[in-house]
Amino acid sequence: MSRNISYNTADQNDIIGFLGAGELTADQQRILGNVRKYAEAHQADLERQGVDWGLTVPEALEHLVAGRADSDAECAGNAYYTALQKIIDRNGSDPSQVGTFSRPSTFFGLMDDELRRLGVPADLLPGDFLFAGPPDGIPFHIPCPVDGTPDIGRLPLARAKPAADAYRAVLDRVDSAFSHELGQLAGQLEFEHDEWRSAQSIDWYSQDTIFFSITG
């Protein structure tokens, strides 16, 4: 099955602030109300498809808000990651598309090997951030999804330009199997860096992370 990779930008602390942080502010409560609606809609879609994870997405969301992810359902990780993605989406910018891949972990793993061969630092390899998992700082463990999807990735916006520069530096030498996707990713990271830099003078702006969503 093909996997779709999209991304948006958000403040990582805003996301963590919904996860077991205690009493929520009025603004957080408003956002959470919207998150609940999207969680319910996603669950309804799963039920139309006959998908049963043993834990519903709305239930998983309430667990996360309460500060736990301890369901023993076999596919609980799928529900928790989906619920977490709803929190990210409702706190972040509008999504953009990276692309659709039949086996993204394999494709980007091979791309990482090629970039590593060309001298790109390990901490800038796409596979390192596309599949990085939930944000650091969540005060409890969230189990991974069965079959690796949905998945979550993240890259600090401060690292977007160094990554794009590293890709541009090797683009004329990279294997042609990866050149199109690498050039596109470099362009997207450059754009997000420029947007981030231009927003630094806005007093309410606090987005600091590119979040990637892998679904399918």
Image: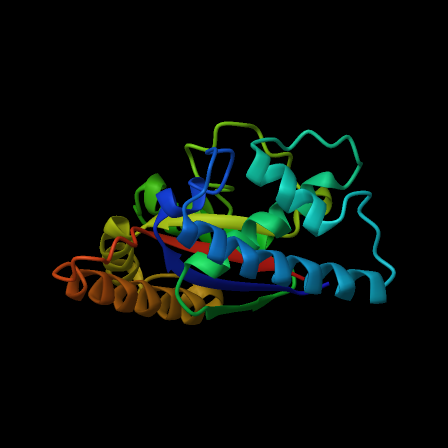
Q: Is residue 109 visible?
A: no
Q: Is residue 197 left or right of residue 74?
A: left
> Residue 65 occupies which quadrant of the picture?
top right
Q: Is residue 31 left or right of residue 208?
A: right
Q: Residue furthest right?
A: 50
Q: Is residue 160 visible?
A: yes
Q: Is residue 46 above or below residue 26?
A: below
Q: Is residue 150 left or right of residue 213?
A: right
Q: Residue at x 46, y 68 (%)?
A: 95
Q: Residue at x 23, y 67 (%)?
A: 195
Q: Position of residue 90 (x, y in %)?
A: 48, 60
Q: Position of residue 64 (x, y in %)?
A: 59, 39
Q: Position of residue 62 (x, y in %)?
A: 64, 42
Q: Is residue 165 left or right of residue 49?
A: left
Q: Is residue 80 above or below residue 41?
A: above
Where's the N terminus, which quadrant? bottom right
Q: Is residue 134 above or below residue 41?
A: above
> Residue 188 occupies which quadrant of the picture?
bottom left
Considering depth in this image, is 116 or 78 the residue closer to the camera?
Answer: 78
What sort of colour scheme is used for the picture? rainbow
Where's the C terminus, which quadrant? bottom right
Q: Residue at x 16, y 57 (%)?
A: 203
Q: Residue furthest left?
A: 201
